[in-house]
Image: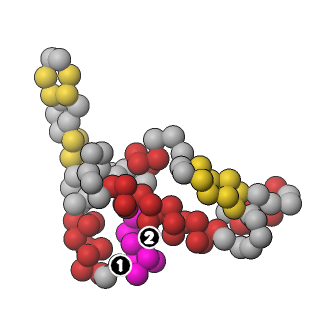
């Protein structure tokens, strides 16, 4: 899950919050932080022009680790199918199946 924060799409975050039972007003408030989000790249020569950020959780936000945990938990709950097909540890996810076809079906 290298660079996982950078790869969480806002639609997945919205889905996970709703699946976790978060009130819709709060889902909208969180998602408002991601609408029209822009950033710049800071270098010795100065800042780049602002550009839109369409994927990823905000770096440095105190809310991002919680959002990431919610996303991982909801994805994990979707994948759980019984004894032991899935192992979660820290930021690693291992899926197991008896065949490649079965693994694809689970995904």
Quarter of the image where the N terminus is located: top right
User: Which residue is painted at 21% across and 41% down in the image?
Assistant: 39
Q: Secondary structure at mark 2?
A: helix
Assess disc 2: are there few (<14), some (14-19) or many (≥20) residues with their C-alpha within 10 Å of its C-alpha: many
Vertical side of 92 occupied by 67: above or below: below
Q: Residue furthest left?
A: 46
Give the position of the C terminus as an image quadrant: bottom right
Which residue, as the protein is rendered here, is positioned at the far top?
A: 45
Q: In the image, is 9 to the left or to the right of 36? A: right
The residue under the point 22% across, 71% down is 29
Residue 76, given in percent of the width and then of the height, sits at 58, 66
Q: Quadrant of residue 102?
A: bottom right
Label 1 Cα crowd, 10 Å radius (few <14 / some 14-19 / many 20+): few
Please provide percent x and percent y for residue 92. Answer: 59, 49
For the point 30% across and 74% down, which residue is it? 27
Q: Nearer the viewer, residue 27 or 91?
A: 91
Q: Which residues are magenta?
A: 13-21
Distance between the alpha carbons at the discs numbered 1 and 2: 9 Å
Q: Is residue 69 visible?
A: yes
| Drawn side of residue 77 relative to residue 85, left or right | left
Q: Of the numbered discs in the image, which one, if any, rests on residue 49?
A: none
* 75 and 34: which is toward the camera: 75
Spot occupied by residue 26 in the image (x, y as percentages of width and height):
26, 76
Residues at marks 1 and 2 touching, judged by CB atoms closer than 8 Å:
no
Q: Give residue 22's mark.
A: 1
Q: What secondary structure is marked by label 1?
A: loop
The residue under label 2 is 16
In this view, the residue farthest toward the right is 98
């Amino acid at each position: 899950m290298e660079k996982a924060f950078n790869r969480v799409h806002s639609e997945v975050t919205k889905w996970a919050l709703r699946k976790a039972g978060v009130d819709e007003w709060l889902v909208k408030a969180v998602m408002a932080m991601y609408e029209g989000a822009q950033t710049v790249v800071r270098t010795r020569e100065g800042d780049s022009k602002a550009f839109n950020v369409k994927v990823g959780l905000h770096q440095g936000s105190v809310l991002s680790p919680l959002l990431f945990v919610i996303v991982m938990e909801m994805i994990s709950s979707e994948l759980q199918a019984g004894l032991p097909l899935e192992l979660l540890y820290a930021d690693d996810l291992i899926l197991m199946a008896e065949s490649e076809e079965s693994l694809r079906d689970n995904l």
